Image (spheres, rainbow, N blue to C red):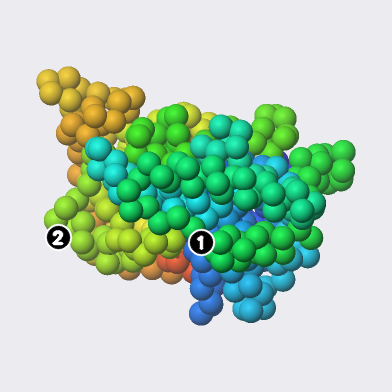
Amino acid sequence: MANVVVIGGQWGDEGKGKVVDILCPAFTDIVRFNGGNNAGHTVRFGDRHFALHIVPSGILQPGCRCLVGPGVVVDPVGLGEEIRSLEEQGISVRPRLVLSSRCHLVLPGHRALDLAREGSRPGGKLGTTGKGVGPTYESRAARTGVRLGTVRQPRRFRDAVLAASQDLERLLGAFPGATVPTSAEIDRWLEAALALAPMVGDVATALHPSSEPSRSILFEGAQGTLLDLDHGSYPFVTSSGCLAGFAAPACGLPARTIGGVLGVFKAYTTRVGSGPFPTELEDAMGEHLRRRGNEFGTTTGRPRRTGWFDAVAAAAAMRWNGIEAIALTKLDVLDEVAEIRLAVRYKLGSEELRELPDDSDDLAHVEPVYETLPGWQAQTSGVTSFSRLPERARSYVERLEELLGAPAVMISTGPRREETILRPVPPLRDWLPDDLLR
Ligand code: GDP
Ligand code: IMO
Ligand code: MG
């Protein structure tokens, strides 16, 4: 069995949580490798609804082990609440969750700094999630951060946190009116962090094939390709690597560990926060997609910006990640649309572009060149086989496959686990056991 990375191909919120939830029974280990609780992954089955932020989505299927790799930044208060909420809903979490000792911790000062920076950026807000994720990665790179493994020595941990908090307080001093965390807040945070100690372990060792050769790993990406720190629309990006290639090395595993890459794409596009979005719809159609697709952030509740599918941006995501197969989500959201548009090229002034520009300012000024396809105006919600989709919906999927050069092996027709088409074709057939594909 291959180890597979599930990666977002757009600006996040593609439906990675749902996809991971469906695939995870075929894997022994589900691993988060980037981001923090800026991520919000929603999973629905029956009448149950879960929002996951740090805990891998695999936790909802019994049996698999869930791991949080060193590249993830952990807010102990947020994670503690997430674990408690899952356990209150009857999900076994603590015995199945391993948190890397190398994870950097999001301190209260990091959150305060995130908010303070957003309030005073000369070019306007980035629209961060305000979870302190960016400043935590800054501390990691500045080598002033605190790592989770230190909780195993409580006295040393407390000293390290107090020193790091003082350091952050000095940085906050540059922002008039910034809220400095109180000592009561830091005490509550320390208590939450120390409570994580029993779950702390060495993720690289736990996942290494020598520990148990029959293990198979599903890496659950957070954010999306176009939010990648280097390859995304900088500076309107998150602060970690979001590409599939990061998954293994970020966890201390060789690059060859990755056996397959599944890219998750929405049948249209959304984005939360600021930054260029060439196919954005700021009209009644955009509002229709937002309402029909329930496009409100899982983490912050913010309305998501909506637009047509952008095949220029998606093609870049295909190449950068080495995506071999596509999971296409939210096809049902287009059910009522009479004419569906697809950006196939851009224009920048008199120049025609087939590649995503590397500069955000250029990306903000491109004009998409659209191809128009007839909508199916029939219900796909809940359809579970490709042949039962309306012909025009099949044509839309086939056109996307052609533009992206990979098969849509999974097509999602509703938020619930059950509302999914799985197509038993390669490479999915090589990745999953037959019983999951039936
Ligand atoms: P993630 O961050 O990539 O895991 O995506 P989110 O969970 O933040 O956002 C995706 C949203 O779309 C969630 O509310 C899902 O329940 C919902 N969703 C996923 N797939 C489908 C689908 O095929 N149709 C509809 N209508 N909703 C879906
Ligand atoms: P999932 O895993 C959508 C966006 C924020 C903002 C930018 C920087 O649910 O797909 P940050 O708080 O990371 O410093 O914010 O990145 N962003 C996301 N957008 N889905 C996410 O995660 C995101 N994580 C960060 O909206 O534009
Ligand atoms: Mg999300």
Which residue of the protein is positioned furthest toward the top in this rendering? 351
Going by the numbered disc 1, the residue's amino acid type is Thr
Q: Is residue 171 above or below residue 337?
A: above
Q: Secondary structure at mark 2?
A: helix
Image quadrant holding the N terminus, namely top right
The one of 35 and 406 positioned closer to us in this rendering: 35
Mark in front: 1 vs 2: 1
| Marked residue nearer the N-terminal end (1 or 2) | 1
Relative image position of residue 216 (x, y in whole percent): 75, 46
Decide if residue 154 is in sight here.
yes
The one of 340 and 376 positioned closer to us in this rendering: 340
The one of 52 and 260 positioned closer to us in this rendering: 52
The one of 220 and 329 positioned closer to us in this rendering: 220
Judge the density around disc 1: few (<14), some (14-19), many (≥20) Cα neighbours within 10 Å.
Answer: few
Residue 182: which disc?
1
Q: Is residue 424 above or below residue 71?
A: below
Decide if residue 425 is in sight here.
no
Pointer 2: what residue? 284
